């Protein structure tokens, strides 16, 4: 009905909705990582795109150097990227705690440029192919579109990780500590909780989420040094729309923005790169704290 | 004391001879500016490799021309027209740059053309593709050297139509180059009796092509033409494979494919792609010899853009050597009068509209079993004579031709 009103056959519309959902799943995992980091460390992590790229490269290295395939990489690559994140937090970001957000932003932005520049220098800008795992090759004809098994898997895996993260932060003792740490770190420290360790782990976890998304993306796009810089600005817009630091907001907004972008690609493809920023502008005017953000 | 006087006389005499030799070289040096994409989507097909090609040209010339040293300056234009135009102006006005080379990305080349025209300086375009550069957007001092969208259309476009691909859907990069390529190919398709069913213009650059692939599938066109380049092309081909576009009976025509794209995709994915190129490393002994030297320095075989940079810079230097001058009009006249005859082109002719007319090649990407070694990617199907690829000068709409 709606599809006919808009002048497109329903098949096309269903297909685009599903694709939007798939891309939205990526936005959700990436913006979730950003939301966790901002929520607990008050850092606008501009290195997120570069770390997402590192996740893809980690799975490539695991395959080429150690012969570890996709399924192993799905666990190991986020651990590797998360460890890199812990080092970044411990040796760089911690020095900036307590001063203006802007410094953290500048540091992570600079880090992103350095990391990406280094990888372009070493591996070129065209990217390296990464094979789709054997079990997920091919696809299924849904009638309105051909769905590659791999893309279906991406949605399942991404949503599972989002759900786990939500559970971890909202329903466990560690999550309660972390949330308490953002409210009043001194008081928490007084209760004998090691707050600096907690923040380090939180940054590591947020970054590991980016690495996880990188592994998911590797078989779809090339393993490309620039894959993160193409995505990071959109993901930031998603976080702003959802509300900085809101976990559920990041997930729901990520998926919704994927769908909106997907539909724009049908009706007005040239605008598909800008539509999310238009939504962001409107949200900032009407609800400056974001759709799910709590106003201070 | 006497010795010093003799020495001084000798030195001043020497200085005078150098002075005469350099009389017509302004500022005592020939300075060439290589402006390219060093770090983004087109960095592999041009980028550092283009800089290396220019360096090789200078070194092979002996580092000096007509008694004056040759200097090379390089910069990253980031595919942004405003950055490129400002840089070109700065180079011409403050840094005494005599000519620009490479200039990938059509929007960049167009912006630099404006500056080069005002300053009456030579622009040797290798990377940018759009045919308007030697048609309605031409400038008297511009040379479009390596290939253009019309040649790609004549090569790949007409080959695909002749094989029965008579209905087309385009995935087009949403900027001047994509539009020019689509227009030139659509003209060929229509002239051969085919039809264009639709177009999706995608943002430049794009990483996710699944949505556009789905629209192309829904169009029912026999051929999906990719009017884009570099990483956009490889991403589109990957998405098309993943979503079963080829398995569903449609053909992909990757209208601008560089050897670096094939390398990035791997032969498993890229096999069977038909493409038009101005250069391939494995054509003959000369191309193999030069490409081997290039590969040793760049770590990859040259694209046509990089080989074109070497050839265009060399032809420019030959003009200075022959005329003993770096005056723009004198050099342009020499470059047009004398054919390009090197490993890159045989009997290439630079026309008054700026087009360098040389033979092009229609190639097919080999399957993994056909490929005998590293970079053995193309089978040359046909040589397209320069006149056919670029059309006669009478067809050019360049006002100053």
Image (spheres, coloured by chain):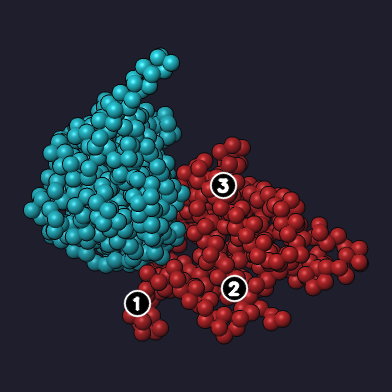
Chain colours: A red, B cyan
Residue A8 is tagged as: 1
Q: Can residue A176 be seen here?
A: no
Residue displayed at 56% across by 71% down? A238
Residue A57 is tagged as: 3
Q: Tell which circle, 2 or 3, labels the residue nearer the N-terminal end.
A: 3
C-alpha distance separating marks 2 and 1? 32 Å
Q: How many marks?
A: 3
Give the chain letter at badge 1: A
Taking B139 as reference, is B93 left or right? right
Determine whether the residue tagged by mark 1 lies in a helix, strand or loop. loop
Residue displayed at 55% across by 81% down? A283
Q: Which residue is mark 2?
A: A240
Residue B332: percent from left, percent from top = 19, 43
Dividing the picture into quadrants, the one containing residue B327 is: top left
Residue B269 is tagged as: none
Q: Tell which circle, 2 or 1, labels the residue nearer the N-terminal end.
A: 1
Q: Relative to A195, say whether B401 is above or below.
A: above
Q: Relative to B341, say whether B2 is above or below.
A: above
Query: Do the dots labelled 2 and 3 sit on one chain?
Result: yes
Q: Are marks 2 and 3 in contact (CB under 8 Å)?
A: no
Query: Do the dots labelled 2 and 1 sit on one chain?
Result: yes
Residue displayed at 38% across by 39% down? B72
C-alpha distance separating marks 2 and 3? 28 Å
C-alpha distance separating marks 1 and 3? 39 Å
Determine whether the residue tagged by mark 2 lies in a helix, strand or loop. helix
Q: Nearer the viewer, mark 2 or mark 3?
A: 2
| In the foreground, A175 or A143 | A175
Q: Nearer the viewer, mark 2 or mark 1?
A: 2
Residue displayed at 71% across by 56% down? A93
Q: Nearer the viewer, mark 1 or mark 3?
A: 3
């Amino acid at each position: 009905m709606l599809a006919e009103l808009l002048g497109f056959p329903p098949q096309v519309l269903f297909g685009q909705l599903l694709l939007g959902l798939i891309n939205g799943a990526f936005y959700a995992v990436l913006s979730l990582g950003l939301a966790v980091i901002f929520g607990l460390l008050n850092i606008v992590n501009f290195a997120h795109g570069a770390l997402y790229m590192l996740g893809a490269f980690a799975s490539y290295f695991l395959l080429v150097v150690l012969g570890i395939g996709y399924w192993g990489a799905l666990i190991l690559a986020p651990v590797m990227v998360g460890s890199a994140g812990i080092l970044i937090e411990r040796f760089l970001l911690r020095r900036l705690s307590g001063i203006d957000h802007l410094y953290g932003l500048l540091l992570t932005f600079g880090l992103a440029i350095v990391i990406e520049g280094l990888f372009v220098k070493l591996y070129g800008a065209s990217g390296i192919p990464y094979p789709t795992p054997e079990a997920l090759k091919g696809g299924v004809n849904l009638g309105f579109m051909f769905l590659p098994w791999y893309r279906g898997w991406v949605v399942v895996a991404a949503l599972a990780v989002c759900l786990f993260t939500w559970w971890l932060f909202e329903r466990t003792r560690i999550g309660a500590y972390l949330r308490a740490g953002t409210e009043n770190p001194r008081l928490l420290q007084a209760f004998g909780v090691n707050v600096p360790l907690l923040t380090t782990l939180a940054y590591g976890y947020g970054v590991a989420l980016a690495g996880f998304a990188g592994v998911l993306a590797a078989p779809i796009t090339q393993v490309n040094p620039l894959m993160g810089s193409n995505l990071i600005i959109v993901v930031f817009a998603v976080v702003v729309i959802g509300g900085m630091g809101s976990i559920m907001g990041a997930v729901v907004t990520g998926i919704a923005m994927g769908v909106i972008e997907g539909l724009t690609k049908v009706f007005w493809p040239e605008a598909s790169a800008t539509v999310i920023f238009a939504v962001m502008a409107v949200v900032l005017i009407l609800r400056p704290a974001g759709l799910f953000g709590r106003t201070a | 004391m006497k010795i010093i006087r003799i020495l001084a006389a000798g030195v001043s005499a020497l200085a005078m001879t150098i002075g005469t030799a350099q009389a017509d070289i302004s500022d005592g040096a020939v300075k060439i500016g290589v402006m390219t994409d060093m770090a983004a989507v087109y960095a592999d097909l041009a980028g550092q490799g283009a800089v290396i090609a220019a360096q090789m040209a200078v070194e092979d010339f002996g580092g000096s021309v007509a008694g004056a040293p040759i200097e090379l300056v390089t910069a990253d234009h980031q595919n942004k027209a405003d950055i490129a135009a400002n840089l070109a102006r700065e180079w011409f006005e403050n840094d005494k740059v005599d000519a620009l080379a490479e200039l990938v990305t059509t929007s960049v080349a167009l912006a630099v053309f404006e500056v080069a025209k005002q300053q009456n300086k030579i622009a040797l375009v290798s990377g940018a593709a759009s045919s308007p550069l030697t048609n309605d957007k031409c400038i008297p001092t511009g040379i479009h050297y390596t290939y253009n969208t019309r040649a790609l259309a004549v090569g790949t476009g007409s080959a695909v139509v002749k094989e029965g691909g008579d209905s087309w859907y385009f995935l087009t990069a949403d900027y001047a180059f994509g539009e020019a390529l689509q227009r030139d190919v659509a003209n060929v398709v229509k002239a051969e009796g085919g039809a264009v069913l639709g177009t999706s213009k995608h943002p430049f650059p794009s990483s996710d092509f699944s949505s556009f692939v789905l629209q192309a599938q829904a169009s029912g066109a026999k051929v999906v033409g990719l009017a884009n380049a570099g990483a956009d092309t490889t991403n589109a081909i990957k998405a098309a494979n993943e979503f079963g576009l080829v398995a569903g009976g449609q053909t992909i025509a990757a209208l601008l494919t560089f050897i670096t794209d094939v390398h990035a995709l791997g032969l498993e994915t890229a096999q069977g792609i038909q493409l038009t190129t101005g250069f391939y490393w494995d054509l003959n002994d000369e191309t193999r010899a030069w490409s081997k030297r290039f590969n040793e320095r760049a770590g990859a075989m040259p694209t046509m853009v990089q080989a074109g940079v070497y050839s265009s810079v060399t032809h420019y230097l030959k003009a200075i050597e022959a005329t003993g001058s770096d005056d723009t009009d004198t050099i342009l006249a020499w470059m047009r009068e004398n054919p390009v005859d090197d490993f890159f082109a045989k009997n290439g002719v630079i026309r008054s509209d700026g087009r360098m007319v040389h033979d092009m090649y229609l190639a097919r990407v080999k399957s993994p079993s056909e490929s005998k070694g590293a970079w053995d990617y193309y089978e040359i199907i046909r040589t397209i004579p320069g006149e056919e690829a670029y059309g006669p000068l009478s067809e050019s709409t360049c006002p100053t031709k």
